[in-house]
Image (cartoon, helix red, strand yellow):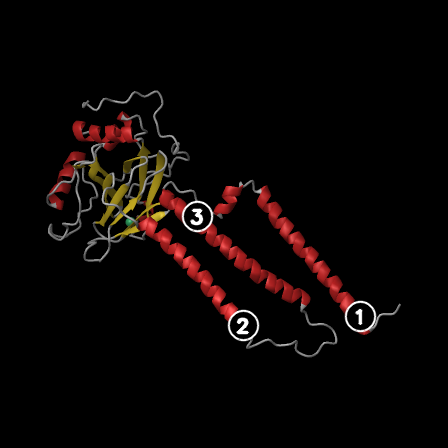
């Protein structure tokens, strides 16, 4: 049987289309195989690269991310299919010289194409606001309030107040001139230290906080902020010099640390509902703040509520340093997530490859020291 010109071209077109469908199927199969062979579990796949956080806020943000990616994939799939169908089945054919039928100014189609994207944006916006409200929410009764002072290029942490078992607060704040309080610290350490002093008068620096229990980062010691597991924590941020940023990657949250928060119209406080597991979490400065910005690290050490109470009592009653108090509650006394940086540019290149176990910071075969109070 002899085929006419038109029949030949449509048979040829169908064969090309079927080849394309096969090729598309192969690409999809290869994609799926890659996904399966990476060894990711379904939960990991559904996280779409979102890191596992250690706070409920981080989990909520993770859910928003998962659903946003799924919604984007659905929209993406519709667009890919529209492109695929068009380039496969509506190609220019031999002997077809006129334009195909044009469908411009089709009101129903145009209304749908305008409404759908706006609907998608509105839904995404709504859920973003809901999650943002949860992440930024604060209560009046956090369990621990921590003052964070950032300065070039280190951190100082102090406990402002801690809620007791009976619901009352124990205050640790110290009132006084920033310069006097800092001068005292220098004597304690026996040598000059870089401190959040700056060159301004006391009354201008009155937003800086000081506490009876402080932890100060130095070129030889990473400041470790000890916190209890499962408790609501409030951070009160202040910078002594330039703008820094308080970032704990595993909280999946960072907040700029401003000097003069009031004059800069910023809210320096934020809270986290709880930290869900004990362990060590690295903290970093996330705002380019000068030469040694990249070395401005700290560590959050999360311990049980009982160990935290013992740690605070040991520091308060026995005047132990941070490292000594950590050791006394059977915790590794130095940071296990990062190393201190000597700002005299003499690093020696001796950064250890393995610092410690960030999941288990307990000292083996250790008996906790008595706090001296019953
Ligand atoms: Cu900084």
Q: What number is the disc on residue 108?
A: 2
Which residue shows up at 24% across the image and 55% down it? 266
> Seen in the image, is 347 located left or right of residue 7?
left
Foreground residue among 29 and 244 = 29
Which residue shows up at 35% across the image and 27% down it? 362
Q: Gap between marks 2 and 3, in whole Å? A: 35 Å
Task: State which tag comes first along the sequence, 2 or 3.
Answer: 3
Image quadrant for the N terminus? bottom right
Residue at label 1? 7
Q: Gap between marks 1 and 3, in whole Å? A: 54 Å
Q: Does mark 3 have its CB less than 8 Å from ligand 1? A: no
> Seen in the image, is 211 located left or right of residue 39?
left
Image position of 319 with respect to 223: above or below = above
Q: What number is the disc on residue 277?
A: none
In which quarter of the view is residue 6 placed? bottom right
Q: What number is the disc on residue 63?
A: 3
Q: Gap between marks 1 and 2, in whole Å? A: 35 Å
Which residue shows up at 43% across the image and 57% down it? 124
Q: Residues within 10 Å of mark 1 (few under 14, many from 20)?
A: few
> Seen in the image, is 317 located left or right of residue 341?
left
Task: State which tag comes first along the sequence, 1 or 2.
Answer: 1
Image position of 242 with respect to 297: above or below = below
Front position among marks 2 and 3: 2
């Amino acid at each position: 049987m002899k085929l006419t010109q038109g029949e030949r071209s449509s048979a040829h077109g169908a064969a090309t289309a079927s080849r394309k469908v096969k090729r598309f199927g192969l690409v999809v199969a290869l994609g799926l195989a890659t996904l399966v062979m990476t060894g990711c579990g379904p939960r990991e796949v559904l996280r779409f690269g979102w890191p596992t956080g250690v706070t409920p806020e981080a989990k909520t943000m993770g859910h928003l991310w998962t659903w946003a990616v799924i919604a984007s994939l659905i929209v993406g799939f519709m667009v890919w299919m529209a492109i695929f169908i068009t380039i496969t089945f509506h190609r220019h054919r031999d002997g077809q010289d006129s334009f195909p039928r044009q469908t411009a100014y089709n009101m129903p189609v145009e209304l749908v194409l305008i409404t759908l994207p706006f609907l998608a944006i509105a839904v995404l916006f709504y859920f973003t606001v809901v999650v943002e409200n949860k992440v930024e929410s604060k209560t009046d009764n956090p369990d621990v309030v921590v003052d964070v002072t950032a300065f070039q290029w280190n951190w100082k942490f102090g406990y402002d107040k801690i809620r007791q078992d009976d619901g009352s607060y124990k205050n640790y704040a110290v009132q006084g001139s920033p310069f006097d309080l800092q001068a005292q610290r220098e004597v304690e350490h026996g040598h000059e230290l870089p401190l959040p002093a700056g060159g301004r008068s006391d009354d201008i620096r009155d937003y800086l906080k000081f506490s009876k229990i402080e932890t100060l980062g130095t070129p030889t010691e990473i400041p470790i902020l000890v916190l209890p597991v499962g408790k609501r924590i409030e951070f009160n941020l202040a910078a002594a010099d330039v703008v820094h940023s308080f970032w704990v990657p595993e909280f999946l949250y960072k907040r700029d640390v401003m000097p003069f928060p009031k004059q800069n119209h910023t809210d320096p406080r934020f809270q986290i509902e709880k930290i869900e597991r004990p362990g060590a979490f690295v903290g970093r400065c996330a705002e380019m703040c000068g030469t040694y910005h990249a070395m401005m690290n700290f560590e959050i050490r999360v311990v049980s509520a009982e160990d935290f109470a013992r740690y605070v009592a040991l520091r308060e009653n026995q005047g132990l340093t941070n490292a000594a108090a950590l050791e006394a509650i059977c915790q590794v006394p130095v940071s296990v997530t990062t190393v201190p940086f000597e700002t005299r540019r003499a690093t020696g290149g001796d950064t250890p490859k393995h610092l410690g176990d960030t999941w288990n910071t307990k000292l083996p075969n250790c008996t906790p020291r008595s706090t001296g109070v019953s």
